[in-house]
Amino acid sequence: MPRPAKARERLLDAAEDLLLARGFAETQLDRVRERAGVSKGAIFYHFDGKEALAEAALERFFQRLVTEAQDALAASGATTATARLFAYVDAVATLTRTPALARGCLLGMVTMECTETNPALAAVAADGFTKWQGSLTALIEEAASERGLDVDATGLATTFLAAVEGGLLLDRHRNSPSAVEAALTHFRHYLAFVLQLGKETAP
């Protein structure tokens, strides 16, 4: 029989659920405590307060995205830089249909809500986006170098993030994954065009 999650993980699970559903302003510590099934003292044993809890939830959310994408990339068996890039795009597309992203992106939601009202928390989300963009930029640069091309890797990485975040936002409103699927499919086609891959050679 699996052991129950530790109090800190249950608090982070509850905080993530409520932040995605209600936003930072409407997420109350008492609601987090009730959902996590812990005492009030347990919250302050692990976190200094609501902002510290939200920051930890953001950091865990981003690290989980990184880990799941890396695991999928390793499992893809891709052996070239170009294949690794497309495997990564496909891995993120798959994540948008799993609990990792299907409910929305915590980084994007916090950025929209807190840029003006809580800059410190928004900065944590921004750091996640910067790291995400940087890692994808490196993959694109490696693929372009492999193919002897000079491309705007940073711009392409930004376009990818815009496709993910914009698609998830539209899908949250529509309660359907169609927008993010369409956005990432079109990005994949455009990436193949930029890297001068014919239909017969695109991964």
Image (tube, rainbow, N blue to C red):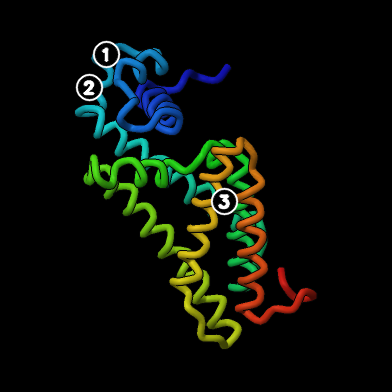
Looking at the image, residue 157 lies above or below residue 5:
below
| Image coords of residue 30 (percent x, y) | 31, 15
Indicate the quadrant containing the C terminus: top left, top right, bottom left or bottom right: bottom right
Residue 106: image quadrant is: top left
The residue lying toward the viewer, choosing from 180 and 140, is 180
Residue 3 visible: yes
Q: Are marks 2 and 3 in contact (CB under 8 Å)?
A: no
Q: CA distance from mark 1 to mark 3?
A: 36 Å
Q: Quadrant of residue 107?
A: top left
Q: Residue at x 56, y 36 (%)?
A: 99
Quarter of the figure with residue 127: bottom left
Q: Would you place residue 45 above or below residue 160 in this image?
A: above
Give the quarter of the figure containing the N terminus. Answer: top right
Q: Which of label 1 and label 3 is nearer to you?
A: 1
Residue at image position (51%, 85%) is: 150
Q: Earlier in the sequence, mark 1 or mark 3?
A: 1
Kind of element beneath mark 2: helix
Q: Secondary structure at mark 3?
A: helix
Residue beneath disc 3: 71
Say what amino acid the circle numbered 3 marks.
Answer: Asp
Q: In the rendered structure, which amino acid carries the disc numbered 1? A: Lys
Which numbered disc flags the more N-terminal residue, 2 or 3?
2
Residue type indicated by callout 2:
Phe
| Above or below, comparing residue 56 to residue 76 in the picture | above
What percent of the width, then of the height, locates residue 35?
Answer: 42, 16
Residue labelled with disc 2? 44
Asked which secondary structure carries label 1, the reply is: helix
Q: Which residue is mark 1?
A: 40
